[in-house]
Amino acid sequence: MGIPVFLLIVFPSLFFAGIILRTKSICSGRKGPSISQPLRDIWRLFQKSAVYSETASFVFQIAPAVYFATLLLAIALIPLGGRSGLISFKGDFVFFAALLSLGKFFNIIAALDTGSSLEGMGASREALYSMLAEPAFLITMASLALMTGHYSFHGIFGALRYGSSLSLAAGALAVFVLIIICLIENSRLPIDDPATHLELTMVHEVMILDNSGFDLGLISLAGSLKFAMYGALISNIIIPHGLAWFYIIPVFLALQISLAMLVGMIESFMARFRLNHNPQYIFTLTSISLLIFLGALIISGKIN
Amino acid sequence: MTIILLIAFIISLIHLSVSKRLKTYVSVLAFQGILLFGAAFIELIRINLVNLLFILLETIVIKSIAIPYFLNYLIRRNKITRESEPYLPDFISLVIVTAIIFGSFLLSGTMYTSINRLFFMAAFSGLFTGLYFIISRKKIITHVMGFLVMENGVFALTLAAGAQMPMLVNAGILLDIFASVLLLGIFVNKIGGILKEQEAGQLRNLKD
Amino acid sequence: MLGTYFTGALVISLLLLLNRKKNWNYILSVAFLILQCILTVYEFNHQGIQELKYFTADALAVILLVISCIISVPAFWHSYIYFSKGKWLPREQSIYFSALVILLTSLSGAYLSGHIAVTWIFVELTTFSASALVYHRRNLRTLEGTWKYLFVCTVSLTLVFIGILFLTMALQQVGLKNLSYSNLLANAPLLNTFWLKIAFLFIFTGYTCKAGLVPMYTADIDAKDKAPSPAGALFSSVLLNAGFLGIFRFYLILSHTGIFSWAGQILMISGFLSIFVASVYMYKVKNIKRMFAYSSMEHIGLIMLALACGPIGFYAAILHLVLHSFTKSSLFFQTGQVYRIYKSKSVYDTGDYFRYNLAGALVLLSGFFILSALPPSGMFISEFLILRSLFESNHYWILAVVLLLLTWIIWSMGKNIFKLLFIPAVEPQEMSMEKIPPWESLSQFILLALVVYLGLNPPFAFTELIHNAIKNLPG
């Protein structure tokens, strides 16, 4: 049961970066590369071997692989349309968050391992942003768990119903929070611009400055996987309960594509925030997720 | 439906706490007027028509058209700088407003009817956020805006508490209009005539 | 009668606003004073009768109404002098008198109202008319004072409204709707104490802006300083009484519930802090008007302490309120003369007042002694009773600290007053100084004499009224 779900999430992710790129091109009046271009770039990177700095230790060498592995494992936790993922157990959403943190942790210590002050700066910023975004994710998931009374992804999304307007509002807010978290975790536009190469304001790009060849390819691919992973979570909230599998697949694909297009649109039409405005912007998510939590408290009847 | 409006009201408060420009403040105030209109319309459709019309006039005409227009006019006429210039960084503002919302939730937990809970929560949040804005902003015009946010909170509270007492609702609304018009109309005009930049700093001579 | 009064006052204030002839202003003002006196006499003789659905003249209302009637006569008289000496535009003069009439009318409405929301509406009206008075001299300083006063009072009175909403919720919980004081008093024991506590906190905080207590005292001080001195006299006597009334009425409602002692503690904290803050500012203040404003804050603080302390305190509080109103208004009228002579309110620019205005200097000197509660003064009696109630309710520490603070306040105030009276100014501009005839101080002597008389030999009707006002309080 879990393997098709896993493949269904992983497969479209390969084209995610391509769709974003294409949307950006069209929005700015260009034709743009084909959708599979980023994939070809990654394939080219995979054929090269990596170059390691003399000061870097083994941590730097294993970090991209660990990062990639954690993401794959995290995706394996995600159910779809009432069907559980590869792995499912009570409290798996905490495990999910822990996996993501582990991946991020390896990324960060790899960046520090290079001994470059520039990468250290990027790592510190990325750590700050993840730290601020983490409570938002956990509170949102915990509220959904509270609303439904289940404690695994499969259970939560299986039991999510929008009977009252309050639960509808909570669901909409959860989707909003997850979209923004998706942008933050992927270091996308309002927070960080992947296209910029001004060292003073770079966040994610500066952190992986030393990675090359196969490692860089893994990290790029992991970025696409991360998008698909959040896209799958969002789809789980949106897709109505009890849909037959032959509807679920097109709806899911449509949602993934529209998320990618949304990201492309945001990147085209929004300006990047000033670096010192980022923390409060990210913390806004925590405030909103707190609202979801309060709503969930009312719905679940824990407080009347 | 009311619940969604009220949640939107609370989110608009969060937005207000991190926004920098006076323009944003004005548009959020107008938006809150529309939200309150929706809430009032749904809640009060049972009471008599004249009262209902009166309340709708207050929310739509006064809160979301006249006051925002007037604030924009004042900002343009007196050439007020566009930044809101808080004393505290926005991040701390955000944390404080979030704490206010959470506190309002706890306070509203002591209410006796669960249906009204979000009403009370929105009302308290508006109220205390408004007070916080009054304390934490430099400009006179942002003080007035803080007061208007507070009045919006009071309006929500009136809807929740006074639905059975039209006299109280009307008294509250009348004085709300009266105070807003007086504060904005007569007074900010006068201040604008005497002071060029509307910094509260220039009105800081009276002390011991 | 009340209907006639309100319509009459409204018509008079409108006519004052529209008319630009100085003499007509005076005639209309006299007409209003006559109306005010008639109302006072009428209500004195018709106590406890409901009028216009929302108004009842109870004992406290009558006491405050009489005070406001007595003080309004010299207030108009000194306003007349104020305008006949200065060069004012007819428009400014009409706005001033019109605002004065509205202020006194809305104060009467607030005193007489028997409904908590109606009281609130009238007190809100006093804010608007009072700010018109503060903005009388149209310059930057008065603008600042007016802005602060208007803003702080509007915010505070919004808090009062919220308190009333909470009270409504508590009432609806037990299926009641009527917000009149008599109904609240009768049903108070039924109400949820948590709601009453919140309502009390909001209403108390809100009315402190009028009473001039901690926490909302700031704007009040500026307003008393910046308003013309006759208006300042009204602010620190009758307007302050309105704030006291708002607090007292709700405190009375709580007296029949389980949270009465809790409310007393709130009053005590606020009163004590007011005395403390007043004593801190008294030390450094150099502006005479502001000094008297802080002194008002100290006295209302004492009154709150008395209210918090039990049976003797209740009587002492009302007595002190009455005596303080007369003393303070008299002193504020006198500051107008000081300003006319020296063109300044600062103690640095003034001095040797006995040489320039003997009668006025005597008013200041005797006013100072009366305010410090030295024995011939009636305030000696009330203040003694307040301290005794503190002692009897076992608040020894507060008593000790308050006594120290009072001594400190008397010293700080005496320092400034004696500088003004006896020590020559640095550069007196004797040529340009105005000669003030002694009869202008007559009204102030009368007010001060009233304080001595009421304290030493209170007429039976007066003590009876006070006892009636506090008859619902326990003990």
Image (tube, coloured by chain):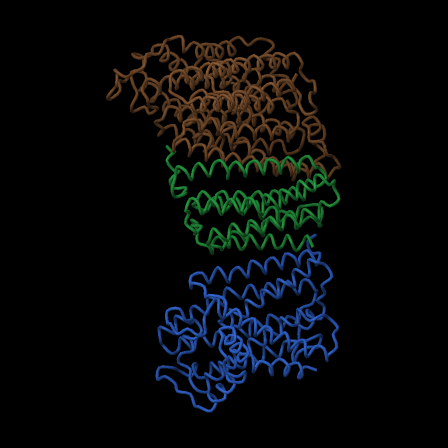
Chain colours: A blue, B green, C brown
Residue B80: where, in percent of width, then height? 42, 47
Instruction: Identify the residue at horizontal 66%, vertical 84% (top origin).
Output: A3
Foreground residue among C267 and B199 = B199
Q: Is residue C76 above or below residue C258?
A: above
Q: Is residue C268 above or below residue A86?
A: above
Q: Does residue A211 appear left or right of residue A233 in this picture?
A: left
In the rendered image, which quarter contains the N terminus of chain A? bottom right
Q: Quadrant of residue A55?
A: bottom left
Q: Quadrant of residue C350?
A: top left
Foreground residue among A48 and C103 = C103
Residue C393: where, in percent of width, then height? 56, 26
Q: Is residue A176 above or below residue B84?
A: below
Judged from this view, the residue extending furthest toward the bottom is A47
Q: Is residue C410 visible?
A: yes
Q: Is residue A197 above or below residue B121?
A: below
Residue C115: where, in percent of width, then height? 66, 28
Q: Quadrant of residue C206?
A: top right
Q: Is residue C383 visible?
A: no
Judged from this view, the residue extending furthest toward the left is C427
Residue A104: where, in percent of width, then height? 49, 74
Instruction: Identify the residue at horizontal 41%, vertical 47% (top origin).
Output: B79
